[in-house]
């Protein structure tokens, strides 16, 4: 498990959103999260016809800069394989999320926390749980901001394995 988990954001993401995300992440995962600051997405990852950033390309750019265990919140739309998404994660590497289609900081934090769970090794869960897949807006609104009992146990095991 990382000693600290880094939070980056693009310049137009308001501080109160970033602070709210950090608070929820600390609550759920009990790790040291650190808001590193502004990181601007590279323009060569932008697709003009789709008006979106390529989420995979942005995450792999971070890897090229040897940055791991991070989440990155940006204000522009994101896509994976040409489809718009709220966020994207690669296990043991990092995740990215967008504020562009989510109206409240509660929804943004919930979506970021779901992807951070994947980075930390949690899998998709079918229970009434934060790790439930939320491909639609409705599902994202209705799922809880906490891990179910089973995911809590799984997370504890992951922590022990990495320590
Ligand atoms: Zn669960």
Image (spheres, rainbow, N blue to C red):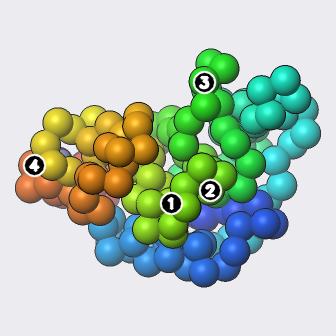
Residue at (50%, 60%) from the top-left corner? Answer: 108
* Dot 4 beta carbon under 8 Å from ligand 1: yes
Distance from Cα at disc 4 to Cα at disc 1: 24 Å
Residue at which label 4 appears: 150
Distance from Cα at disc 2 to Cα at disc 4: 29 Å
Query: Mark 2 and 3 residues: CB-CB less than 8 Å, in contact?
Result: no
Residue at which label 2 appears: 99
Q: Position of residue 43 (x, y in %)?
A: 90, 39
Q: Position of residue 12 (x, y in %)?
A: 78, 66
Query: Dot 3 lies on which element?
Result: strand
Q: Position of residue 120 (x, y in %)?
A: 38, 48
Query: Mark 1 and 2 residues: CB-CB less than 8 Å, in contact?
Result: yes
Q: Earlier in the sequence, mark 2 or mark 3?
A: 3
Query: Dot 4 lies on which element?
Result: helix
Residue at which label 1 appears: 108
Residue at which label 3 appears: 83
Q: How many marks?
A: 4
């Amino acid at each position: 498990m990382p000693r600290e988990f880094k939070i980056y954001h693009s310049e137009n993401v308001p501080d109160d959103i970033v602070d709210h995300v950090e608070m929820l992440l600390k609550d759920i995962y009990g790790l040291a999260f650190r808001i590193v600051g502004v990181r601007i997405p590279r323009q060569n990852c932008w697709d003009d016809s789709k008006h979106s950033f390529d989420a995979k390309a942005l995450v792999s750019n971070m890897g090229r800069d040897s940055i791991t265990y991070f989440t990155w919140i940006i204000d522009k739309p994101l896509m994976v394989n040409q489809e718009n998404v709220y966020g994207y994660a690669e296990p043991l590497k990092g995740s990215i999320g967008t504020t562009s289609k989510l109206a409240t900081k509660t929804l943004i934090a919930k979506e970021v926390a779901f992807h951070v769970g994947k980075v930390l090794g949690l899998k998709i869960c079918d229970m009434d749980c934060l790790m439930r897949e939320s491909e639609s807006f409705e599902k994202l609104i209705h799922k809880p901001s906490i891990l179910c009992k089973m995911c809590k146990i799984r997370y504890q095991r992951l922590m022990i394995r990495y320590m």
